[in-house]
Image: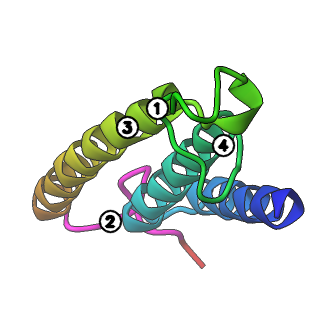
Amino acid sequence: MELIFALAVGVMAGSGIYLILRPRTFQVIIGLSLLAYAVNLFIFATGRLRLDAPPVINPTLGGNPALYTDPLPQALVLTAIVIGFATTALFLVVLLAARGLSGTDHVDGQEAEG
């Protein structure tokens, strides 16, 4: 499971970096979102990937930390998802305003010649 999870994070991060380097602003915004989701998955994985493991200590199982998932990365990822959604909405509004003012959606503000 860890290998599949690591591959998913790697593919998302690679795709995000590829899209960030594109000349159109919408592709840059999608790339930033993909990169943010990859980082969120990475942070989520730091809390141990366990199936059906409670995040709160159960008195019947004891206090062995290997039996539990860490709730802190889960809380951080939840907060990061909300912040990422808000910044993506802000970027889209700025994209629409810049396109309306300049008439193009290129990052540098001018169409490529050729």
User: Whole-Å distance between the Cαs marked 4 and 2?
Assistant: 31 Å
Indicate the amino acid at tag 4.
Answer: Phe
Dot 2 corresponds to which residue?
105
Q: Is mark 1 on a helix, strand or loop?
A: loop
Q: What stretch is highlighted in magenta?
A: 103-112
Q: Position of residue 87 (x, y in %)?
A: 26, 42
Q: Mark 2, mark 1: which one is toward the viewer?
A: 1
Where does the N terminus fall, quadrant-wise? bottom right
Relative to 65, 73 lies left or right: left
Q: What element carries label 3?
A: helix
- Write the residue at 15% across / 61% down: 96
Q: Is mark 4 on a helix, strand or loop?
A: helix
Where does the C terminus fall, quadrant-wise? bottom right
Dot 4 corresponds to which residue?
42
Dot 3 corresponds to which residue?
80
Indicate the amino acid at tag 3.
Answer: Ala
